[in-house]
Amino acid sequence: MITFQPHIDATFLIVLVFPACALDSYIAAVYEHSVILPNVTGSPVCPDDALMLMNKNMDVLEEAIKAAAQQHAHIIVTPEDGIYGWAFTRDTIFPYLEDIPDPQVNWIPCTDPKRFAPAPVQERLSCMARDNALYVVANIGDKKPCNSSDPKCPSNGHYQYNTNVVFDSDGKLVARYHKYNLFMSETQFDYPKEPELVTFNTPFGKFGLFTCFDILFHDPAVTLVSELQVDTVLFTTAWMNVLPHLTAIEFHSAWAMGLGVNFLAADTHNTSMAMTGSGIYAPDGPRAFHYDMETENGHLLVAELSSHPRLSPAYPAAVNWSAYAKSVKRFSSDDHDFNGIIFFDQFTFTELSKPEGNLTVCQKDLCCHLSYRMAEKQKDEVYVLGAFDGLHVVEGQYYLQICILLKCESTDLKTCGQPVAIAQTKFETFSLSGTFGTTYVFPEVLVSGVQLAPGEFQVLSDGRLISQNGTSKPVLTVALFGRCYEKDPPQPQSTLLFLNNGAA
Ligand SMILES: CC(C)(CO)[C@@H](O)C(=O)NCCC(=O)NCCS
């Protein structure tokens, strides 16, 4: 605090010389928001009605932001589509959009609201950040005028972008990111011509941001970490959970671990769309997470993180994901292999028929090895080990290599791979590995009730995902989710491609 005193005191000098002292750790908050949706209309509403709906959502976000500030949070992330929802056409979303300037203009909307007016949403978000003295991350819609000299200019004369914005603790706009990998239903938005690598520096580390479906692809997500070396990723999402391997908390925590970054994931909450699952994840495991399919309530998470997780002594040395698996021979024959489907992909499975054992299952270039011991083999539960090496083509195209241990939906082997949320079987130990042809592997562990198991498993430098003492809750899924980005079709994937290939 600068106090007005006639002499220059020590506090004043420190503030002058170190305007922001570096912090070794900071307090992060994410808010899972149960978004108030507009009525579905065929024609656009007027701007006042659009703002009224957005203000209702911002009323709720403001309470969460105040509560986070009371718990001394330095930054809070709020979800994708959290201010206006998602059921739009290009025309009906238009009244919800604002022209969001490049942050280089140095703008505090709260103190200078008319400079790029009309911008009531940016003004209010900026004031929430300023009044509560913390960074606020939100997802809103940007519109950018274009004209007929641009052959790609949409017919309404505007590009429309799904956009993350960040306001610092003075309320200044410090980052703007336009979503690149739009999900199939997002026909209301355009994608930017090139993926944007958006970062900003704070006294508590370097931050990068992207949105939802971006997490499945190389750009900008992987580049932000591997080349721009961000410490923490800010992630807004409206994630529709897919068991057994693509639930929000499971996949987002695995991405943080696989790439070795902090990851703040704020999910929209809407149980009818299977949207729930937010978290504060560090490279060595989750610090806080939330999954709730029982209520329609929002939920605030607050936890402390290291500002530079890669510098911490606990940070694991680089992992060679295939070292162990390539050094051993097959554990078991393929005599009892069978096929099954996980989320439209045909896996090769083999059953864990004994209470303990060593198994191998292969598909194409990928062999997966499992060593395990169950606490007790339950008669009414069946587990399998599975392998998949191929291009996933439904709701997007991306090349996968996956090793997975999962509980089948029933004792009928035909149900293996179908969603199941509850289990009874505890494992005393497991060790899973695979002969991956990629360095991008995300280690997943999901336990009964769709929960995470912080601190109950680890990755060894030879690529084994192990649990020495088992997890305290019964196992749903243990997986090594590998991504072979170089085998993907070109990015980004247009809506047209989804229309041609989208099954479901
Ligand atoms: C898990 C996944 C990828 C399976 O296809 C899918 O269910 C999913 O959550 N996709 C990302 C959703 C997204 O971008 N939402 C924003 C607009 S509604």
Image (cartoon, rainbow, N blue to C red):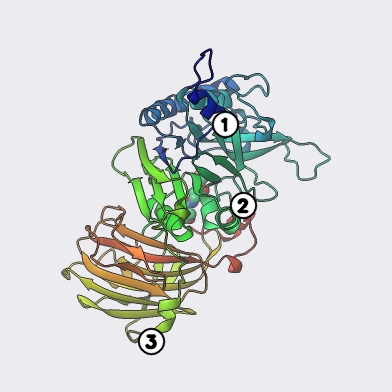
Residue 35 appears at what percent x and percent y? 43, 34
> The disc labelled 3 sits on which kind of residue?
Lys
Whether residues under marks 3 and 1 lie with C-beta atoms below 8 angstroms apart, the answer is: no
Quadrant of the image occupied by residue 405: bottom left
Residue 353 disc label? none
- Residue in front for this viewpoint, 501 or 290: 290
Q: CA distance from mark 3 to mark 1?
A: 61 Å
Whether residues under marks 1 and 2 lie with C-beta atoms below 8 angstroms apart, the answer is: no
Q: Nearer the viewer, mark 2 or mark 3?
A: 3
Secondary structure category for the residue under label 3:
loop
Residue 329 disc label? 3
Q: Is residue 355 left or right of residue 54?
A: left
For label 2, the residue is 495
Q: Is residue 139 above or below residue 117?
A: below
- Residue in front for this viewpoint, 123 or 244: 123
For label 1, the residue is 17
Secondary structure category for the residue under label 1:
helix
Secondary structure category for the residue under label 2:
helix
> The disc labelled 1 sits on which kind of residue?
Val
Q: Classify 10 Å Cα crowding around label 2: few (below 14), some (14-19), many (20 and above).
A: some
> The disc labelled 2 sits on which kind of residue?
Thr
Q: CA distance from mark 1 to mark 2?
A: 52 Å
Mark 2 close to ligand 1, CB under 8 Å = no
Query: Which is more N-terminal, label 1 or label 3?
Result: 1
Q: CA distance from mark 2 to mark 3?
A: 44 Å
Quadrant of the image occupied by residue 480: bottom left
Residue 309 appears at what percent x and percent y? 45, 52
Query: Which is more N-terminal, label 2 or label 1?
Result: 1
Q: Classify 10 Å Cα crowding around label 1: few (below 14), some (14-19), many (20 and above).
A: few
Residue drawn 28% across the image and 59% down it: 456
